[in-house]
Amino acid sequence: MKNKYICKKCNKFVASRNDEGEISINPKSKKISLKGKEFRIVCKCGEEYKIQF
């Protein structure tokens, strides 16, 4: 699992995860949704990321 998620398209911070499993998400993201055990985050540029916990 990754600890830091950086957008590949625009190189901006998307989310990070610490050692305890806490996830910090950039509040400026376009869309944040939760489906079961998975976060879907859409960056301002439109790139979509999925983070499982």
Image: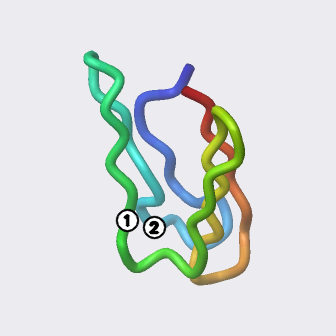
Q: Is residue 5 left or right of residue 27?
A: right
| Residue sitting at x 47%, y 59% | 14
Vertical side of 21 occupied by 25: above or below: below
Q: Is residue 15 left or right of residue 20?
A: right
**Total tally of numbered discs in the picture:** 2
Q: Which color mode does the image show?
A: rainbow
Vertical side of 51 occupied by 13: above or below: below
- Residue 41: x and y, percent? 61, 61
Kindly indicate the quadrant of the structure image that contains residue 31: bottom right
Q: Which quarter of the rendering shows the C terminus? A: top right
Q: Which residue is mark 1?
A: 26
Q: Is residue 31 left or right of residue 14?
A: right
Q: Amino acid at mark 2?
A: Lys
| Residue sitting at x 27%, y 17% | 19
- Residue 48: x and y, percent? 73, 62
- Residue toward you, 20 or 10: 20
Kindly indicate the quadrant of the structure image that contains residue 52: top right
Residue 48 bears which disc, if any? none
Mark 1 or mark 2, earlier in chain:
2
Q: Which residue is mark 2?
A: 12
- Residue 49: x and y, percent? 68, 53
From the image, state whether disc 1 or disc 2 is nearer to you.
1
Q: Amino acid at mark 1?
A: Asn
Mark 2 Cα shell of 10 Å, populated few (<14), some (14-19), many (≥20)? some
Do the numbered discs 1 and 2 sit on residues whose CB atoms are within 8 Å? yes
Q: Furthest residue to the front? A: 36
Distance, label 1 to label 2, CA atoms, is: 9 Å
| Label 2 SS | loop
| Label 1 SS | loop
- Residue toward you, 31 or 3: 31
- Residue toward you, 49 or 10: 49
